[in-house]
Image (cartoon, rainbow, N blue to C red):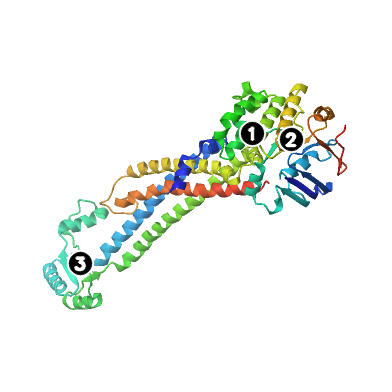
Amino acid sequence: MSAVLDLIVGDRQADRVVPPTGLTARLTVFAAAVMAFLAVIALALSLSAGRVADRWAQDLAQSATLRLPADPELADVLLIEALEVLQTTPGVASARALSADEQQALLEPWFGPDLPIDTLPVPQLIEVIATDEGYDAAGLRARLNGQVPGAVLDDHSASRAPLLQAASRVRSLGWLIVLLIGGVVAAIISLAAQASLNANAQVIRVLRAVGARDVYIARAFVRRFTLRAGLGATGGVLLGLIAISLLPDSEDVGGLMTNIGFQGFGWLWPLVIPPLSAIVAFIATRAAAFARLREQI
Amino acid sequence: MIELDKVSYGYGGTALFSQLSLALQPGSFHFLTGPSGAGKTTLLRLCYAGLYALGGQVRLFGQDIAALDRDAIALARRRIGVVHQNCEFLDHLSVAENIALPLTVAGRAHEAAGNLKELLAWVGLGLQAGQLPPELSGGERQRAALARAVIMSPDVIIADEPTGNVDWEMSQRLLTLLVELNKMGKAVLIATHDLNLIRSVKSDVNARVLRLKDGQLTHAGTEL
């Protein structure tokens, strides 16, 4: 902790031995800010994908849909029979027939709001919610086949797998992007530090000649780049959070692309980026500085 | 304090000198003379570990520099005040800050306050203390370099043509400072081809004159 404090507070005398270098300073701050901004977006994407995947998995795993044949004359009988079968099936927590309004809402994205559903042969849908233990799908299908001919039980397994896989890949991609951003930050800061060290060759010569140890010379460079990276990343994170908060909130829709953002403790994740950027800068600059110093006696 | 034992050095495969030996004892005063290109600056650099010898052994304060790590070499350099021929400074710091630099890097900046003012006055740079090095003349830079070399009160002072750009009066003042330091037990090694400078101090100090020519280091004697 004291080492971190030393790094932040610094030694005014030691800091002054290295002249301020405008270009590399601005480059470092700018690069760190841009990378932090992108990291916030990638992080939001990854966390959102994770949330969506979890919700889909939870919602779809316990629900199923029973579709009854669209036969206006037998509709009521089929519905009663089907509900009776479902209510007497172990592992089924509840079974509920969707209302006409709910069915219309389901069809609305394809047919529009004015669809006269009452006059159309639309199959009746029943929402089936399983208990935590679940039910025997094969046995239920066999009973339905005998008592409610034409009824189709869809336990969503076919549609669930690719959705979950896609969400999982988006989540992994987000983390990969964050990692790559970290690598790019290290590379940019390393280059900027080397440019600064080359520009200050005379400073290094003079300091070595008067007995400065490598760690003394390196510290002035390392501290400067570490603070610049931390400062730039803080700015980038703030801009990223503002950008995320300005995205339209479409929680009700529940889609991946319309739900990018942070929730709850997730808002704390971006706060990790500035210190992480500073650590990356510290390691990259220190390595570059000592490599450069070792080149001369 | 500083010993060169049968050292050799050269550039681009061509030997500048070989089997060359030299010992700087506490309180010794040496002048190093020789024609341009003979290797005087190279020899001085070997003395303060500014170069590694290609052969032989260099010992700083009793330790073989081949066995010293970089930190140990840096610490040894704090005991050697060097006036370089090209007098490099940190151009963004004031003259006073540059002169105090050895104390600053040693973490003894607080000691500078007392010595610095006196030293600046001694080398005639009291009025230039707040200026930046690029604003100084050649002679002023050499005086500032000498002040920087002695501020830590080093055990050894090595100077490469320290009076090359200063007038006779100032060169005498600078030399007097080196003689005073020598009387305090410091070893002094000065590379110069100004024989009048050597003659001017022979009554004040028991100086040995070394001549480097054709790769050989010979004693020219104290009488010139």
How packed mark 1 is, by other alpha carbons closer than 10 Å (few <14, some 14-19, many 20 or more), is some
- Label 2 secondary element: strand
B52 with respect to A213 (left or right): right
- Label 1 secondary element: loop
A148 with respect to B2 (left or right): left
**Nearer mark to the viewer, of 3 and 2:** 2
Question: Is residue A185 in sight in this rendering?
Answer: no
> Looking at the picture, which amino acid does disc 2 mark?
Ala
Q: Position of residue B149 (x, y in %)?
A: 67, 34
For residue A74, which quarter of the picture? bottom left
> Looking at the picture, which amino acid does disc 1 mark?
Ile
- Do circles 3 and 2 both sit on a common chain? no
A162 w.r.t. B173: above or below? below
Q: Which residue is mark 3?
A: A129
Cα separation, mark 3 vs mark 2, equals 92 Å
> Looking at the picture, which amino acid does disc 3 mark?
Ile
Q: Position of residue A179 (x, y in %)?
A: 46, 54
N-terminal-most mark, 1 or 2: 1
- Label 3 secondary element: strand
Residue placed most toward the observer, A144 or B120: B120
Residue placed most toward the observer, A167 or A266: A266
**Nearer mark to the viewer, of 1 and 2:** 1
Q: Position of residue A39 (x, y in %)?
A: 43, 48
For residue B151, which numbered disc appears in the image?
A: 1
Q: Position of residue B174 (x, y in %)?
A: 73, 27
Q: Which residue is mark 2?
A: B159
Question: Is residue B172 in sight in this rendering?
Answer: yes
